[in-house]
Image (cartoon, rainbow, N blue to C red):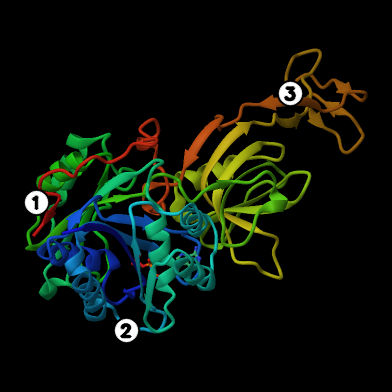
Amino acid sequence: MTRKTMHIGLDDTDSTRKGCTTYVAAVLVEKLQKLDAEFTDYPNLIRLNPNVPWKTRGNGALCLRIRYGENVEGQIKETVIKTVEEQADFECKGTDPGIVFFEGAQIPKEIKAFARNAITDIVTLKDAVKLVSKFGGEAVGFKKGRGIIGGLAAVGETLHADYTYEVLAYRVSENRGLKRCVDEASIFEMDEATAPYTFNNVDQEKGRVMITPRGPDPILFGIRGETPEIVKKAFRMVRAFEPVERWVIFRTNQGTDAHLKGVENLGQIKPYSPVIVRGTVTTNPKMIPRRHVIFSIEDKSAQADCAAYEPTGVLRKVASKLIIGDYVEVYGGVRAPSQHRSSTINLEKVQVLRLAPKIAFHNPLCKKCGRRLESMGKGQGFRCRKCGSKHRSLGKVEVKLKRDLKRGLYITSTRSQRHLTKPFRRYGMEKRHVTVEGLIDGWHFP
Ligand code: ATP
């Protein structure tokens, strides 16, 4: 019997009060394997543009890539549709699930480009539907069907550039919504034992655990890392005091900076897009209410405000130490447009490229006794308190102060990093054009 290849994209099944599309994918892993489907890749968890205003949480979309017997094709599609119908939070306004079925081993370039745009920009449902029909795929949309966008983008992002893994463990339904019971000490131990090959397990600054989400979703915890083996090892080290219903290893673009796109100048930045752009600091940073720090940068083309919010921790401190004339590269999402403001970039990272000299003007020293002089009033010269001498012709002297900031890259604190933000721990670990050959034994349960 002929075996065929299919890519199944899923998105927008959850709401803030219920569900998670990764859970739908995890349930489908079990169900599709019962139909003798063979997974050609780990389920892909693709994070899309984090600045999309209508996302629920982390703007994640899923793709399952399988080989299967032609005779069960109908059953596979039915199973996927039925599972989405069972799991999605249809009552919630703004939950608009979408499924994309795409057959064939090769993903067309145009669909890959669509995925790239969905990660770095805003794309439309109309374009998604056009592409699905152009290449003979099938799209199933519920309600407004906006999830078709994410579904197609997940199909198109085949993760041939940098990628990472995440093992996600899910709670049994009775426990969802209750406090998560996981031994925190075991998480710190796991982090130490698996570093630097796992990342974002804990926030070292605050001594806080990061792997357990807070909301009512079904995730108990998730561990991110460089290989399927290391996330599985880490998973085994975490002691949970409540039952784990199922777990799955996903391959993902998390922690890769895939969303950030370099633009040539500030004139090119667009609302909702995550950018990397250079500019010269033109205003000294100011603290606004709720301890956020704002400064402006400009180049020949335009000017933009940069905002480092309170939870960005390290980054906020760095931002507050910048001065007019510093030359920086900023990384972050461009905020929604506003009539009253110029463009604002919400900072995720700052690379300090050049530090401007910090100059202060001091009173001169006494020529007779060496003590610092005091002013006799504007334009009247200086006098010495110690020896009484007067110096009418002297002016203030320029003094170069030491900067309390070094050149280099600064990243927002772990607790405020986006799913896509590449943390320091991953620098130097990037993978390039590596193809996944075979999955490890036991990459999911059940
Ligand atoms: P979770 O992370 O909990 O799964 P979410 O944050 O992924 O939830 P969704 O409920 O999936 O949020 O909502 C995001 C919606 O935005 C989806 O319908 C998706 O298709 C759509 N979308 C994603 N990226 C883009 C984009 N770049 N342009 C336009 N629409 C997008």
Residue density around tag 1, few if under 14, some if 14–19, many if 20 or more, within 10 Å: some
Residue density around tag 2, few if under 14, some if 14–19, many if 20 or more, within 10 Å: some
Q: Is residue 76 positioned above or below 50 on the image?
A: below
Question: Which element is circle 1 on?
Answer: loop
Residues at marks 1 and 3, CA–CA distance in whole angstroms? 65 Å
Q: Nearer the viewer, residue 52 or 128?
A: 128
Tell me whether the residue at label 1 lies in contact with that at label 3, contact meaning CB atoms closer than 8 angstroms. Answer: no
Determine the residue located farthest toward the front in the rendered image: 1
Q: Amino acid at mark 1?
A: Arg
Say which residue label 2 marks. Answer: 90
Residues at marks 3 and 2, CA–CA distance in whole angstroms? 75 Å
Disc ID at residue 174? none
> Where ligand 1 lies, by image quadrant?
bottom left
User: Residue, x 55% and y 37% (percent of image)?
Assistant: 351
Question: Which element is circle 2 on?
Answer: loop
The quadrant of the rendering that contains the N terminus is: bottom left
- In the rendering, at what x and y percent does residue 399 appear? 73, 25
Q: Amino acid at mark 3?
A: Arg
Between discs 1 and 2, the one toward the N terminus: 2
- In the rendering, at what x and y percent does residue 307 appear? 58, 54
